[in-house]
Image (cartoon, rainbow, N blue to C red):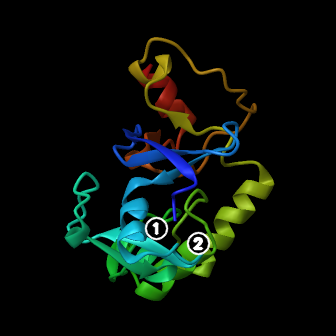
Amino acid sequence: MYSDYRIYGPYVNKDKRKRIVLVSKKDCHQKTSVSYPKYLVETSIGRYLNVNEQIHHKDGDFSNDEISNLEIVKLGKHQRLHNPPKVFEDKLTKCFWCHKLFLMTKKHQFHRRAKRTQNRPGPFCSRKCSGKYGQSIQAGTLGMNLLKFGETFANGNAEPSLKIQEGVETRREASRTDEGIVQRTNIERWRSKS
């Protein structure tokens, strides 16, 4: 199998996995690298692995390259072994708009994950709250005045560089204390604290 190659290694990669370098005996400029466990299994069974076959370490230790610890598995099964599907459970969550606690079901969590909405605002307890949030974004009364912790004005040392419209006394803003966003409902109350 590998009789046409000179074998160098095994070498350890940054991710602690071993590889070998194969240099062709006919053309020294033709080089390739192969996973060391794959090389061991292929030489022990006497054939190359198929495209959809991979080597799995039974004990999960990549440094343990004994033949008894290595097994050939199909690509899909190998991916499921290392990345099991996420199991969702019903959980209590705070609404992004009205701050009420509601039960976020498995179906709701799966839908948010499937739509890749992790970086979007939410979750919302109802369509009504989602709609109110959308209206406030379109009207420009939300989002432009969110204050983040860690800036100089969070300690009361300096005012933020926000352009506050004249005559606007109150604004409703989102409260996301877990991500470091402060809730302000009254501009005058904020000015009195600083």
Q: On the rendered structure, is 126 left or right of 88? A: right
The three-letter code of the residue at mark 1 reads Cys
For label 2, count other residues whose C-alpha is less than 10 Å away and answer few (under 14), some (14-19) or many (20+). Answer: some
Percent position (x, y) of residue 80?
A: 42, 78
Residue 62: mark in rendering: none
* Residue at image coords 73%, 35%: 167
In the picture, the quarter occupied by the C terminus is top left
- In the displayed structure, 123 sits above or below 172; it is below
Residue 63: where, in percent of width, then height? 25, 51
Disc 1: which residue = 95
Residue 47 vs residue 137, the one in the foreground = 47
Q: Identify the element where label 1 is drawn.
A: loop
**Front residue of 24 and 110:** 24
Residue shown at 20% from the left, 72% from the top: 68
Q: Quadrant of residue 115?
A: bottom right
- Crowding at dot 1, Cα within 10 Å, few <14 / some 14-19 / many 20+, comes out as many
Which numbered tag is attached to residue 129? 2
**Cα–Cα gap, marks 1 and 2:** 8 Å
- Discs 1, 2 touching: Cβ within 8 Å: yes
Q: Amino acid at mark 2?
A: Cys
**In front here: 89 or 189?**
89
The image quarter containing residue 106 is: bottom left
